[in-house]
Image (cartoon, helix red, strand yellow):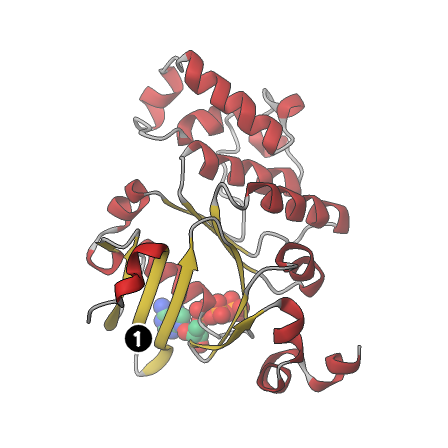
């Protein structure tokens, strides 16, 4: 299948993607287009296919049919996970996966672009440019004062921010962020929203989220995609999707309409 002639304008273009697990259609004829610099929120009920979609982008799962093009030239469905990571697609899972016995600084060091593997990374003396970059990331993720703490000693929200910082250290062009607000306090959630908003534009970000207060914070003035049964049910502004008849039927529940 040839992706339309406008392919160059998209950072990511998925077309006609299908994935079946033991006869169950998790992703069905999915089309999804993402511009550079977008902060796109993807919502949908449990089982809608959100995680599977991220698995397909990162090479964890291979589709039965369809194409997922990155930067208009790389079909990631033909690449392995490591090749996709090297292309600049970074993923943050719902539960933090930081190195708890290593310091915040070391966690960033381990994630630097072109990282040399755990041992050589830890003994690698970062260049002044790399150090400046890591200091800048610490500021962005608000962990400058925790730089020498073991990552395991951080609060849950701080671990999530460190992990976002690790994606920045990796120099990911596309950040895939799965339910960042899960398990966070309201204050942490709001700060996470501010962090993601500060990254949008310079970075391209896809956020999967259930928490609609958080969604309204990060998606104001932006496009939201609603997935349902493995396909895009609708896309549009956050008010538009929250008032969409089909979304009200399948996801948000009629009562929310008058909330
Ligand atoms: N490896 C697998 N084997 C079998 N079925 C799977 C597998 N992975 C996902 N599924 C099924 O595919 C469907 C989509 O799952 P997925 O986890 O992508 O949904 P989701 O939108 O992320 O849901 P949630 O919001 O609950 O995380 C579900 O019915 C799930 O049970």
Extreme residue in the right direction: 259
Spot occupied by residue 80 in the image (x, y as percentages of width and height): 23, 51
Residue 17 vs residue 103: left or right? left
- Front one among 14 and 105: 14
- Front one among 56 and 70: 70
Q: Quadrant of ligand 1?
A: bottom left
| Quarter of the figure with the N terminus | bottom left
Identity of the residue drawn at 63% across and 74% down: 240
Identity of the residue drawn at 35% across and 27% down: 118
Residue 102 vs residue 248: left or right? left
Crowd tier of the residue under label 1, counting other residues whose Cα lies within 10 Å: few below 14, some 14–19, many 20 or above: many
- Above or below residue 13? Residue 86 is above
- Front one among 244 and 229: 244
Q: Is residue 235 visible?
A: yes
Identity of the residue drawn at 25% across and 71% down: 66
Spot occupied by residue 132 in the image (x, y as percentages of width and height): 49, 18
Name the image quarter holding residue 122. Answer: top left
Spot occupied by residue 146 in the image (x, y as percentages of width and height): 64, 24
Q: Is residue 62 visible?
A: no
- Front one among 152 and 120: 120
- Above or below residue 168? Residue 244 is below
Residue under circle 1? 18
| Quarter of the figure with the C terminus | bottom right
Extreme residue in the front direction: 5
Identity of the residue drawn at 43% across and 24% down: 109
Name the image quarter holding residue 4. Answer: bottom left
Secondary structure at numbered mark 1: strand
């Amino acid at each position: 299948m040839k992706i339309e002639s406008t392919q160059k304008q998209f950072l990511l273009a998925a077309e006609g993607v299908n994935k079946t697990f033991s006869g169950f259609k998790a992703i069905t004829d999915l089309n999804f287009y993402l511009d550079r610099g977008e902060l796109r929120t993807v919502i949908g009920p449990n089982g809608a296919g959100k995680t599977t979609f991220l698995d397909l982008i990162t090479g964890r799962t291979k589709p039965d049919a369809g194409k997922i093009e990155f930067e208009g030239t790389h079909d990631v469905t033909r690449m392995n996970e490591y090749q996709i990571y090297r292309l600049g697609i970074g993923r943050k899972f719902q539960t933090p996966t930081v190195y708890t016995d290593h310091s915040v600084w070391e966690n960033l060091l381990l994630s630097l672009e072109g990282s040399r593997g755990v041992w050589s990374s830890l003994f690698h003396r970062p260049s002044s440019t790399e150090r400046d970059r890591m200091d800048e990331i610490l500021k962005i993720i608000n962990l400058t004062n925790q730089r020498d703490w073991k990552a395991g000693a951080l609060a849950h929200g701080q671990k999530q921010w460190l992990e976002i910082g690790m994606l920045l250290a990796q120099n990911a062009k596309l950040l895939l962020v799965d339910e960042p607000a899960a398990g966070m306090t309201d204050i942490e959630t709001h700060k996470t929203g501010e962090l993601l908003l500060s990254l949008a534009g310079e970075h391209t970000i896809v956020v999967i989220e259930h928490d609609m207060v958080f969604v309204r914070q990060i998606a104001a003035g932006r496009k939201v995609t609603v997935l349902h049964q493995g396909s895009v049910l609708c896309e549009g502004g956050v008010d538009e999707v929250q008032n969409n008849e089909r979304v009200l039927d399948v996801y948000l529940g009629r009562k929310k309409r008058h909330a």
